[in-house]
Amino acid sequence: MAVRQIREYGDEILRKKAREVEVIDDKIRELIEDMLETMHKYNGVGLAAPQVGILKRIVVIDLYDGNEPLRLINPKILKTKGTQEVEEGCLSFPNQYAKMIRPEEVTAEALNEKGEKIKIKAKGLLAQAISHELDHLDGILFIDNMLPGTLEYVEPKEN
Ligand code: NI
């Protein structure tokens, strides 16, 4: 496993549409484990493959709630319900946060790292994270969704 370099805002790859994964092989599984390691290193809740420079439809999500992180290949949102006003950031925008409206509930399907179809019914923070990460696969960034005037820079905490 290895920590990969995170692409930051201004890198044009973040605006490109990612391609479906056709074959889930060891190379894909290695990418997924690297994405998890990279996300954990920077204390992120989610990371999409384009953020490490790979235009494939893969995202990882970890809410640090004791559950196994989600590894989602070719994920699709099937339906959403309700709305929630949330504050969020993105590892491609260090120390920046904004408010936006996300769905309160999301039903999604994807393949896991074994190629098995999985279905996820998410609420709250998980619904927000799925919505944010799947946007990345279509070149959509959180600043596209933010409520006007809510973007703020927060000084990083000293470690
Ligand atoms: Ni992001």
Image (spheres, rainbow, N blue to C red):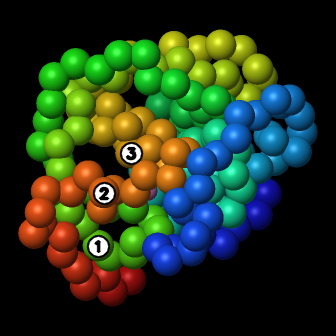
Residue 27, percent from left and from top: 88, 45
**Disc number for residue 96:** 1
The quarter of the rendered structure image containing the C terminus is bottom left
Question: Is 62 left or right of 52, judged from the image as shown?
Answer: left
Which mark sits nearer the N-terminus, 2 or 3? 3
Disc 3 under 8 Å from ligand 1? The reply is: yes
**Disc number for residue 24:** none
Would you identify the image quadrant in which residue 29 lies? top right
Asked if the residue at tag 1 contacts the one at tag 2, i.e. Cβ–Cβ closer than 8 Å, the answer is no
**Disc number for residue 144:** 2
Which residue is identified by label 3? Answer: 132
Asked if the residue at tag 1 contacts the one at tag 3, i.e. Cβ–Cβ closer than 8 Å, the answer is no
Amino acid at dot 2: Asp
Residue 9, percent from left and from top: 46, 73
Residue 6, percent from left and from top: 59, 70
Crowding around mark 1 (Cα neighbors within 10 Å: few <14, some 14 to 19, many 20+) is: some
In what quadrant does ligand 1 lie?
bottom left
Disc 2 under 8 Å from ligand 1? The reply is: no
Question: Is 143 left or right of 49, judged from the image as shown?
Answer: left
